[in-house]
Amino acid sequence: MSDVAVGHDLSPFVTAYPWSAGFGTKYTNPATLPANDVYGISFSPSGNDIVTAHGFNPNVTAYPWSSGFGTKYTDPGTAIPDEGSQPAFSPSGNDIAIGHGSSPFVTAYPWSSGFGAKYTNPGTLPGNFGSGVSFSPNGNDVAVAHGGTPFITAYPWSSGFGTKYTNPGTLPVGTGRKVTFSPNGNDIVVTSDSSPFVTAYPWSSGFGAKYTNPGTLPTGSGRGVSFSPNGNDVVVAHLITPFVTAYPWSSGFGAKYTNPATLPTGSGNGVAFSPSGAEIAVSHATTPFITAYPWSSGFGTKYTNPGTLPAGQGNSVAFRPLPASSFNPAIAHRRCMLY
């Protein structure tokens, strides 16, 4: 059994549920709510913490997690300077990076059940608004999707930002929205505002030559992207129907999977696989704001909506990693691939 959390517009701005092949009864809201709309959400690798990036000071809010929200952690000593868009933990759980709206566009801290003293900014900053952040599975690199050319910027990581990697030979087209590494760390995918809306590269301490675009592109601005835990599939949440588009993945995009029989009801803003890879959830603009499906090399029949819906537009979604005690050999193998 896992948990799933949705960042959304309108108070309480974050809503979470137990997850066991479907939504359980909504957890109690945090005693101290995020200050405004939550645009990004992330559980720590241990599953013991949850972090929300949001509008309004302090722009990031974090809580202990144990089958529900604990008492809010102290805000960072050095705040991120503007609207938070996406938090990401390093695979060890010892660091956290947050994309945000104003310079330096990405801010990182040590993490140990709370924020440590801010790391020095990168020597070369992302070009503009940091919309998405991702650490490589081995924790040696961190990438930022952002506004302003080159739209994707990556750095070595070792308890701080190293010297920026060379830009890709072929850049993404338009504002970078979200970025993720494949579970084995051999590939990196970024979504963007302009066609082809998703761009992928081999990764080996730097960008390789861009992969061929999908044969069937997403139909609008790519707002979220996720690999299945085994790395065999990649899914893009995007504007314009069908709002979510999925492909097999094997060092490049395969032929698009059939759309879900029941589509998300509005613009897809976020997408995430469950830890087992047996389910997938999409956060989106229109009620019920979150839609989930079984996954087995394609979309199954939509799960029943939560009994208590998120209060507004679903901006982001995250599943809690399985606790170490929930050992399953198949899942353990996938987690070894991740870390």
Image (tube, grey):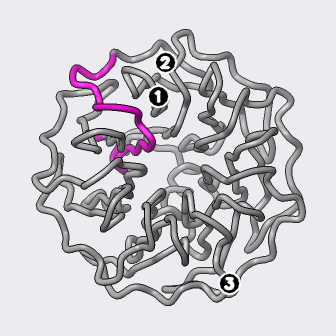
Amino acid on which the number 2 mark rests in the picture: Ala
CB atoms at circles 1 and 3 under 8 Å apart?
A: no
Magenta run includes residue 45: yes
**Place of residue 277 in the rendered image (x, y in percent of width and height, measured from the top left):** 63, 45
Residue drawn where x is 29% and y is 77% of the image = 122
Q: Earlier in the sequence, mark 1 or mark 3?
A: 1
Q: Residue at x 18, y 52 (%)?
A: 79
* Magenta stretch, main secondary structure class: loop
Q: Examine the rendered structure and indicate whether residue 306 appears above or below residue 206.
A: above
| Above or below 214: residue 282 | above
Q: Earlier in the sequence, mark 2 or mark 3?
A: 3
Residue under label 3, please give it. Answer: 170
Find residue 311 and name its label: 2
Pick the front one: 110 or 99 = 99
Query: Of label 1 and label 2, which has the lower sequence position?
Result: 1
Task: Point out the stretch of residues depicted in magenta.
Answer: 29-49
Inspect this view and state whether residue 2 appears: no
Q: Which residue is mark 1?
A: 9
- 61 is within the stretch colored magenta: no
Q: Residue at x 55, y 66 (%)?
A: 181
x, y percent for residue 310: 50, 20
Q: Quadrant of the C terminus?
A: bottom left
Name the one closer to the observer, 11 or 207. 11
* Amino acid residing under circle 3: Thr
Cα gap from disc 1 to disc 3, whole angstroms: 35 Å
